[in-house]
Amino acid sequence: MKSDFLDELFFSAAFPLPFRVLCLAGLGILGWATNLHGLHLCNIDAAGALDLNNYDGYRLTSPLPTDRRKSGLKEVRQSSQTYRPVYRVFVAYSAWSLFCWLLFRYATKGDIARVDEWKFVPAVAALCLLTVLVCPFPIFYKQERDKFLAAIHRCAFPSPHRVYFSDVVFADIITSFAKVLGDLWLSLCMLLPSGSLLSHPAYDSLTRWILPVIMSIPYAIRLRQCLVEYNSPNNESRRPLFNALKYASSFPVIFLSAAQRIVVSDITALKGEAAAREPWHGEHQLFRLWLLAAAINSLYSFWWDVTNDWGLDLLVPKHNAGTARLTDPPRPLLLPRLHSRSALLKHPADDDVPDDIPHAIAHQERRPHPYGLRQTLLFPLAMYPFAIMVDLVLRLTWSAKLSTHLHAYSEGDLIIFWIELAEVVRRWIWVFLRVEWEIVKEARELDATRSSPSAGRLSAGADVDVDARGGGSRIAMDRVDPMHSIREPIFEHDDFEMVPSDVSGHNSEAG
């Protein structure tokens, strides 16, 4: 036991918590870059589905928002122009973080007594990164920084009427960094003059609740997004409400974990300090309640990932697996999928791109598919069972990942770091299948719309206005969003031609 404690102490001295936070944040950047790159290699238009090409300040400028009145869509960039800047951001970020960590290691020379003398090094490293992030000057990848800050702004102050799919994915990614946000708070306390990099700050009656509140913020953001979708006057599904319950179920895990210090105090009073340091306290009611909350949250989240976020049939009842996803009639459209983001506008140079992808997907739906998956699979078959197993195992570590009371034991630092790292990997895999399922759903809805009798017919209230200005044209057309039935105008440049779309940009219910 003593040797394990010394090993953890040397780990904290060699790789302090502030540097571990920087490391995990860097891996998040790398994971996002490889997500975009991998989807591009699989011919999946992630940039279109996530609206990454239509950024303007603190909003998205796809044809969906009602505030887009002044100009048409910008020409869509190549997908490689989306992920390459993220790679460059990661290289610059990791180079600076690595330099600061090597400087810290060289200055301390592995001596535990010198660690706190040089704790200003990680403080300076983090402060410089924060300064660059909010820098208003057009340097250091300002467009990528602005996109990141805009995503945070939209999630923190969302519209009460609309939730974008890109914000759903971003908020879900942030929930995987909830523990890292808690570590960020602990790092700040450690870097204060009264703190130490070798031990966690002491908890008193009030400060013990700061950490769980910080860790709850990402789940509160995602919960609010679900409630906005559910309360939308155009919503006809209870799915956002069930999704909201998933995020609400994480709060008991977090706060019951903070209450485990009461369990430790009671066990210490009854059995002594040695018994209190044991990991199992099944005789205490609060401990059993915490385990129950963690089990419910983990299993419900796993079911939601597989069934709703990935669209797989593994956990769907047999009488629903074959029909539930395909029998819902599409809502009427003014023009089929005129509002789609990426493939709606195609430059004349891109005429060789096929426009029958939805029909190909519909043809695949009539063919048998592997058990527990779905008819349309855009990734190699082996990826799906691997992703399911990884998701199950790492979801079951939820109790440790969201357990604030584990911070009270410095010997848990190494284990917690590996759990946080594994969660980043799990979310990285999740993003691939989440974006894939969104695109598959869009293709199905598009094909169903084309096949419906009402497809291609203008509604009675439709308006078509062609305004020539300097030889150009502007098409302003009222239409109905098939997911939310919001009538909105669409503006286009005359440099593009209208073609059918295979990728849509609508709001998302599952997250």
Image (tube, rainbow, N blue to C red):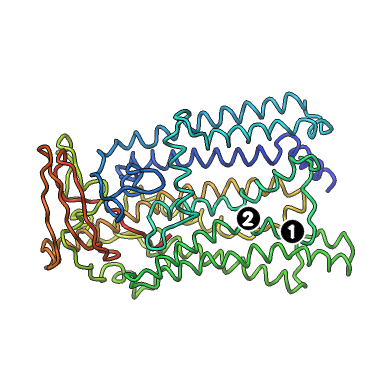
Dividing the image into 4 quarters, which one contains the C terminus?
bottom left
Quadrant in the picture for residue 359:
bottom left
Residue 312 at what x, y percent from top left?
38, 61
Rendered residue at 80%/52% (across/down): 202
* Helix, strand or loop at mark 2: helix
Disc on the earlier residue, 1 or 2: 1
Report the side of 249 relative to 408 (left or right).
left
Viewer-closest of 265 and 316: 265
Tell me the SS state at disc 1: helix
Up-down: is 275 above or below 85? below
Question: Horizontally, is 506 left or right of 338 in the view?
Answer: right
3D distance between C-alphas at marks 1 and 2: 11 Å
Crowding near the residue tagged with mark 1, few <14, some 14–19, many ≥20 C-alpha atoms within 10 Å: some
Q: Pointers 1 and 2 in contact (CB under 8 A)?
A: no
Residue assigned mark 2: 214
Q: Nearer the viewer, residue 492 or 109?
A: 492
**278 vs 509, nearest the viewer:** 509
Q: Residue at x 60, y 48 (%)?
A: 420
> Which residue type carries mark 1?
Arg
The residue located at (73%, 58%) in the rendering is 405
State the residue in front, 31 or 213. 213
Quarter of image, res 13: top right
Q: Measured along the vertical axis of the image, is residue 181 above or below residue 216?
A: above
Residue 403: % across, % down:
67, 58
What residue is rendered at 46% in x and 28% in y?
139
Residue 152 is left or right of residue 351, and the answer is right
Q: Which residue is mark 1?
A: 208
Task: Identify the amino acid type marked 2.
Answer: Ile
